[in-house]
Image: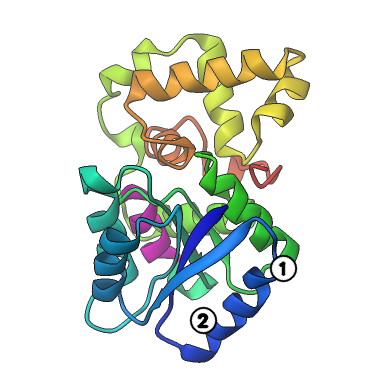
Amino acid sequence: MIRVLLVDDQTLVRAGFRALLEGVPDIEIVGEAGNGGTAVALARQLRPDVVLMDIRMPDVDGVTATRLITGDAQLSGVRVLVLTTFAEEDDVFAALRSGASGFLVKDTDPDELVQAVRVVARGDALLSPSVTRAVIRRSVQSGRPAARRRPEPPELALLTAREREVVQLVAAGLSNDDIAVRLVVSPLTAKTHVARAMAKVGARDRAQLVVFAYQNGLVTPDGYDAGSTGR
């Protein structure tokens, strides 16, 4: 059973997600929070598998709450899935850097939301390609230092040519199965390449690997390939 904590400052939004997820046999709603501070407290108390986190909330926002949850060693098994709108692109990028395992837009299809919860619960990252492209484009246009303007990090040199290619495909939103098809290798081999790349660059999960790829110029917004959502 996947234990989920719902976090949103709008009661009707939480009620909608509860109504949707409660009918799924392998998902259980264990609590609700209206702001990030309460979310952190409930995460420590309830130890959910997945926190469905809004970003814009009063008192303690979703980015801060995400950082507090993912930075707590006692909550290492708790994953944060951010729900957002296109108006919050910069905050989504910040949430990924704070340790979120992925994000979806709030108007995503019900089946995609259910699948997202399952993907994140099993330890993978869920990245919505359309939102990823917008987030990274906004981050570049807003003046964040581009990778080509700063020294290449030593972690980048540790990657083999194949691992760089795999990181690029992960950043394009491809799952391990998708990568295996693209590179004509087995899913296990693709998974191994991803795991090794994550270890070499110090990425917590696939979401962090995507951040690394864009920050260091392995992928650019204009070169983004809207592929799989990571399922």
Q: Position of residue 165 (x, y in %)?
A: 58, 20
Residue 90 is inside the magenta segment: yes
Q: Main secondary structure of the magenta part?
A: helix
Q: From this view, report whether residue 49 is shown above or below residue 189.
A: below
Q: Residues within 10 Å of mark 2 (few under 14, many from 20)?
A: many
Kind of residue at disc 2: Arg
Residue at which label 1 appears: 110
Q: At 57% across and 33% down in the image, what residue appears?
A: 170
Q: Which residues are magenta?
A: 89-97
Residue 13 is inside the magenta segment: no
Kind of residue at disc 1: Pro
Q: Quadrant of the C terminus?
A: top right
Residue at which label 2 appears: 14
Q: At 46% across and 42% down in the image, what residue appears?
A: 207
> For the residue labelled by badge 2, is the local secondary structure a helix, a strand or a loop?
helix
Q: From this view, report whether residue 13 is shown above or below residue 114.
A: below
Observer able to see residue 221? no
